[in-house]
Amino acid sequence: MVTSIPLRDGRSVPAIGFGVYKVDDEQAETAVGIALDAGYRHVDTAEMYGNERGVGKAVRASGLDRDDVFVTTKVWNDHQGRDATLRAFDASLDRLGLDAVDLYLIHWPAAANDRYVDTWRALVELRAQGRARSIGVSNFQVPHLERIIDETGEVPALNQVERHPWLPQTELLAFHRRHDIATGAWSPLGRGRLVDEPVLTRVADAHGVSVAQVLVRWNVQQGVAVLPKSVTPARIRSNLNIEGFTLTDADLDAIATLESGQRTGSHPDSVS
């Protein structure tokens, strides 16, 4: 099974990460500790989530070597622009209690504010300093990607976007592949709304697994780094356990019929 996704800068990101959106600081410390004990080696947080301290505590308390845990965080829209981004990054590192992050992302393009190019330049500086080992973006669409590449000559290592069978992001993934940009998937379970989808239930039953495991496998099998989220210990462990089955071509064809364009989160053009 694919265990990591290569990045264009020569590094790689674990194929399955642990998301902590809408998890408070104290709960994040507990959940991340369980996830690391279960075998996760990528934790995805953000300034906006308000739980970087809890994440950092769990990473430091895990007993794992720092280089064995891939930590991602993100700069929020209010702190875009070169100087504000650099300050926000320092604050994130302080809350995490780390000397560097493995991946630093622009959380949203927030295009109406027109600061994401200068923000991207700040991320390039942070990478040059070695404090952000890899840099990328989140929720960027093709025009946003084209602009930062054209204006800076720097291509993101990864773009993290909402991705699940309702919203497979086919055109965006094709752009990513042409430009050697890795894809990360948030909300892979459609915020839980896909778990009762009959097509997915049938596929899961055929393999003797859960729908959540099918959705994680669906992303990983297509070379996409995926970020399932749960605070329930059994589900945290189950979401990581996708080695015992492979989705067939027939499975993938059936799942493809679910494409509708439906989002469970915001459209990037609506976020400022």
Image (cartoon, grey):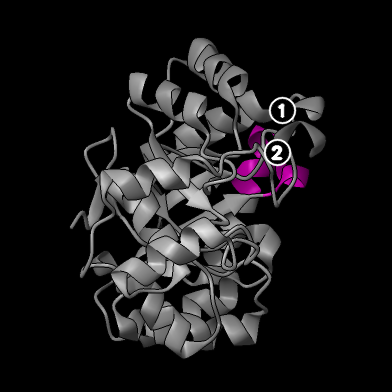
Please name the predominant secondary structure of the magenta segment in the image: helix
181 relative to 78, above or below: above
For disc 2, the marked residue is 80
* Marks 2,1: beta carbons within 8 A: yes
**Most foreground residue, 164 or 226:** 164
Image side of residue 35 versus residue 261, left or right = left
Element under disc 1:
loop
**Most foreground residue, 82 or 137:** 137
The quadrant of the rendering that contains the C terminus is top right
The part of the chain drawn in magenta is 76-87
User: Residue 241 occupies which quadrant of the picture?
Assistant: bottom left
Residue 81 lies within the magenta run: yes
Q: Residue at x 49, y 72 (%)?
A: 97
Alpha-carbon span between mark 2 and mark 1: 6 Å
Type of amino acid under label 2: Gln
Q: Residues within 10 Å of mark 1 (few under 14, many from 20)?
A: some
Q: Residue at x 48, y 49 (%)?
A: 185
**Most foreground residue, 94 or 34:** 34
For disc 1, the marked residue is 115
Q: Tell me residue 46's x, y (percent).
A: 60, 59
159 relative to 201, above or below: above
Q: Residues within 10 Å of mark 2 (few under 14, many from 20)?
A: many
Q: Residue at x 54, y 12 (%)?
A: 151
Residue 105 lies within the magenta run: no
Q: Tell me residue 202's x, y (percent).
A: 44, 64
Q: Tell me residue 254's x, y (percent).
A: 43, 46
Element under disc 2:
loop
